Amino acid sequence: MIKILLLCGDNIRAKSYASIFKKRNKCSVTGLLYGIKKDINKSTTKINIDTDTKEYLDSINVDIPSLNKDIESIFTDNNWHYILTEEREVNSLEIITKIKSTDCDYVVFAGYGGQILSKEHFLQGKKYIHCHPGCLPLERGSTTLYYSLLNDRDLSVTSFFMTEKIDEGNMLLRESYNAPSKLVDIDVWVDNALRADTLFKTIELLNKHYKGFPKKEEEDDQEYYVIHPLLKHIALLSLNSQN
Amino acid sequence: MIGENKYKYMDSDAPNVKINYSYSKYLGLEFIDNWKASRIENLIEFDKEYLDIVIKNIDSRAVEEGFISSKELFSKWIKSIDLSNLDFLKDVNLLVKRFEVTRKVYNEYNDLMRPNNKKDFLEIDIYSLYGIILGLLFSLTKKYQYLNAHVKLNDILLGWKTNNLKKDSLTLRAYSLDLEYNNVTKILNKKSIPND
C-alpha cells in the first residue's frame, strides 16, 4: 500500500480527499496541515448538499465527500499522523523541510487558492500529485468545468505529476464523467467530489506501480482563464434548459 | 460601481483597477437580465461604412524601434483576420493571456506582446479595437476564450466616461459592444436560455 502525504490547508478540497482516503482505505495517510492556527475556534457553518447535486453524484457513482468537519479533526478521528503549522506560505523553508523529512511515496497537494509550488519542492525527490478539473491538455487553466459545459462536453478530471510548470507533468489518469442534466453546485460539491474520485482511482493505479504517460505533441492544447460570470451563468442555465 | 444597474461588473476605475470575477455567485436568469440591461442601454446605431472608414484611416505613428503601436496592429488584424496565419493566432492568443492577467491593453507592444511602457494603457480606442478583434474571432472560431476576454473588455469599456469622446471613438466602442451582444444572444438562443 502506498504512503501518501496530504499537503493541505483547511479547505474543502483537502476534506474531500481525506473523505475518500478514509472511505476507500487504499493508502496510508500522513498530513502536513498548513496555515492553520492551533486551538482556534473551528467554524461551525454547515455545508449542505442540494438534492439535484446529490442525485447527480449518485448517478455517476461518485462518493459525496464529508465537508462538515475541520481537517485536523478528520485526521484526529482517523488516527492519522499529522503535523500542524501556522505557516501559510507553501514555499517556505519550514514547509519544504517538513515535507523532505516525511516518509512518503507521494505528496498530494490541496493548498490554498492561487498558490503555486516553487521549484524547491521538486528538487527533493518527492513526487507530487495534483488533480486538475478538466481533460488535459485540452482544458488547461482555470474554471474549466464550466468551459466543458459550454462546449457541450462531459466533465473530466486529470491527475498528473506536478512539475515546475503548471499542468505539464506526466499524466496519470484522465477520467470522464457524464455531464449533469440539472443545475448542480459545481464550485463546492461537483469539482471536489470528482477530483477526489479521480484521486482514489489514481491511487489504485499507483498501488500497481503505474508510472503514467506523457502528453502527446499532436493533442489539442487550450488554455482557459477565470470564467466571466456571464459565461458561468450560461453554462449553468443551459443545464436547466435541458429539462 | 456605476449607476442603478444591478450588473456588478462595471467599474469607473477600470482599467486602473482589476474587476474581480472569481467565485461569482449564481443568480439565475436575473443575471442574464442584468447583463442585457447593461448592454442595451449602451448599444447605439452606427454606420458600418463609416466604421470601415474609421478603421481604414487609423494611421501608423512613430514608435520606439522594436515596438508597434497597438492601434496600427489591431486595425491591421481587423482588416484581414486570417485563421490560417499561425503567427497571427499566436500573437492574439498571447495577448489574450496578457489581458486576462493584467486586464489592461497597452499602447505599444513588442513581438512577444510585451508592452513598451506599463504606464501607457488608457486609450479607449485601443480597447475598442481589441474588443472588435475578440468579437470577430469568437464569431469565426466559437472558442470561448475569446468571448470570455471580450465580455471582460466590454465591462471596462462600459465603465469608461464617454462624455468627451468623439464620433470615431464612440463608433469603435459601439461595434465592440454590438459584437458581444450578438454573439451572446446567439448562444443564449442556441442553448434555449430565455432572454427576452
Image (cartoon, helix red, strand yellow):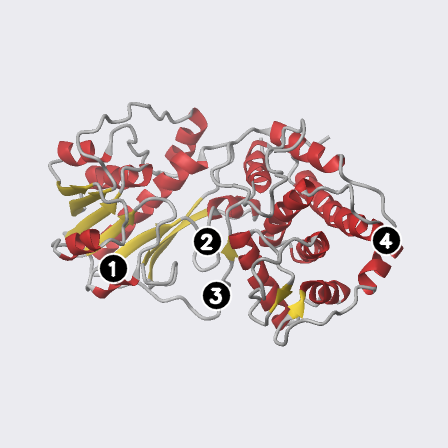
Three-letter code for the amino acid on which mark 3 is drawn:
Glu
Q: How far apart are marks 4 and 1 (CA)?
A: 56 Å
The disc label shown at residue A141, or none:
2
Residue A220 at x, y percent in the picture = 51, 63
**Horizontal relation, residue A237 to residue A210: left or right:** right
For the residue labelled by badge 4, is the local secondary structure a helix, a strand or a loop?
A: helix
Q: How far apart are marks 4 and 3 (CA)?
A: 40 Å
The disc label shown at residue A121, or none:
1
The disc label shown at residue B137, or none:
none
The disc label shown at residue A219, or none:
3
**Horizontal relation, residue B155 to residue A45: left or right:** right
Residue B36 at x, y percent in the picture = 69, 34
Q: Which chain carries label 3?
A: A
Three-letter code for the amino acid on which mark 4 is drawn:
Lys
User: Mark 4 highlights which residue?
Assistant: B48
Q: Mark 4 lies on which chain?
A: B
